[in-house]
Image: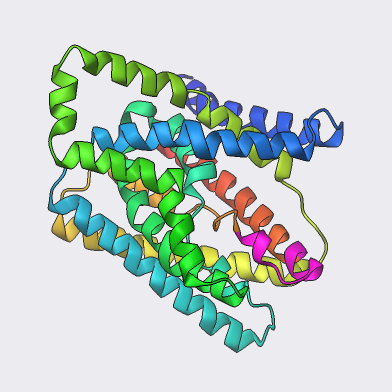
């Protein structure tokens, strides 16, 4: 009975906020402009608070470097597999390879991981996220913007101004230099932690609401979308197992870090991808693929919740 209650404690908030988001879309209670505002709130305010605290309190050593390098490498490998898949299937859609790599940690992963282990354990998930964030903001977006005709200069400028990147840099700087320890030991330590916790608190609920609002399957190229999503799932399962095996041979991998890796590899591709569709047909295909991937990720989360409790 206790295990069932523990599982329901994790799953029901997800189901509820997704349902509320879907209901608000269907009834027109919240408009698309409102959703854009909520996304901006998460990306520019609440998620940076989560990231600053996560890296502010992280332990720095060879482990964080190994994890970041491993995640960056597997993201590159997955992108290569995506290009191979596109060549083998002879699909003309340029976005197909990008559906095979990258993870939507910011707008989904942190919310799910927090439900599993609480905000206090989010440092492990942030550590796993670091390498793939670097990949997304360098290789991933550079290739996507190049394909869309945007210059590398604009990509670098956007990266430098990204609240996500800036918050990671700030958190890592404070943590790695020892300033975080000094601040924490001072009378200001509790105040800083309290402020970050307060700002970060609504992140999970708002993210799940937005995901539910945007969860919509379209019929355009649904068959191809299913094949891409299934192929990605198999690729990520293999790569995730490889990463866990490799990390375990080099550094200690505790329970929360192990599940952080497993959850990361179950997440959908970055939600930014639909804006790079070259036409309405390709945009519909990408949206359908992301929706299917999200549903699969949520199903995997439910399984993880059962195993974690």
Q: Residue 66, position in %: x, y?
A: 21, 58
Whether 79 is among the magenta residues is no
Q: Residue 236, position in %: x, y?
A: 45, 63
Whether 275 is among the magenta residues is yes
> 97 and 146: which one is in front?
146
Q: Could you say which quadrant of the image residue 98 lies in?
A: bottom right
Q: Could you say which quadrant of the image residue 22 lies in?
A: top right
Residue at (33, 61) in percent of width and height? 71
> 26 and 169: which one is in front?
169
Residue at (56, 31) in percent of width and height? 11
Number of numbered discs overlaid on the protein picture: 0
Q: Is residue 185 visible?
A: yes
Farthest residue in the right direction? 27
Q: Mostly what secondary structure, the magenta segment?
A: helix
Q: Is residue 22 left or right of residue 48?
A: right
Residue at (28, 38) in percent of width and height? 171
Residue at (37, 58) in percent of width and height? 134
Give the magenta range: 273-284
Q: Is residue 45 left or right of residue 125?
A: right
Q: Is residue 249 above or below residue 86?
A: above
Q: Could you say which quadrant of the image residue 32 lies in?
A: top right
Q: Is residue 74 above or below residue 266?
A: below
Q: Residue 297, position in %: x, y?
A: 56, 49
Q: Is residue 109 left or right of residue 90?
A: left
Q: Is residue 265 visible?
A: no
């Amino acid at each position: 009975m206790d295990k069932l209650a523990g599982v329901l404690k994790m799953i029901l908030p997800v189901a509820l906020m997704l349902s509320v988001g879907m209901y608000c879309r269907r009834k027109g209670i919240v408009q698309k402009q409102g959703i854009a505002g909520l996304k901006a709130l998460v990306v520019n305010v609440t998620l940076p608070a989560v990231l600053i605290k996560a890296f502010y309190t992280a332990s720095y050593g060879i482990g964080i470097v190994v994890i970041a390098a491993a995640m960056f490498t597997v993201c590159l490998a997955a992108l290569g597999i995506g290009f191979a898949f596109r060549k083998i299937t002879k699909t003309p859609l340029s976005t197909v390879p990008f559906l095979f790599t990258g993870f939507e940690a910011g707008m989904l992963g942190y919310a799910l991981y927090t439900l599993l282990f609480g905000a206090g354990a989010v440092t492990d998930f942030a550590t796993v996220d670091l390498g793939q964030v670097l990949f997304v903001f360098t290789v991933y977006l550079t290739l996507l913007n190049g394909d869309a005709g945007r210059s590398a200069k604009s990509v670098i400028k956007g990266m430098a101004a990204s609240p996500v990147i800036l918050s990671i840099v700030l958190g890592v700087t404070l943590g790695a230099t020892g300033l975080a320890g000094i601040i924490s030991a001072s009378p200001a330590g509790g105040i800083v932690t309290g402020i970050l916790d307060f700002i970060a608190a609504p992140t999970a609920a708002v993210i799940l609401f937005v995901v539910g609002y945007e969860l919509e399957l379209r019929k355009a190229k649904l068959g191809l979308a299913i094949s891409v999503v299934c192929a990605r799932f198999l690729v990520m399962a293999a790569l995730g197992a490889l990463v866990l095996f490799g990390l375990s041979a080099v550094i200690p991998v505790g329970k929360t870090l192990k599940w952080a890796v497993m959850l990361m590899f179950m997440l959908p591709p970055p939600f930014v991808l639909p804006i790079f569709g070259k036409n309405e047909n390709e945009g519909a295909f990408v949206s359908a693929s992301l929706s299917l991937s999200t549903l699969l990720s949520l199903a995997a989360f439910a399984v993880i919740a059962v195993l974690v409790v």
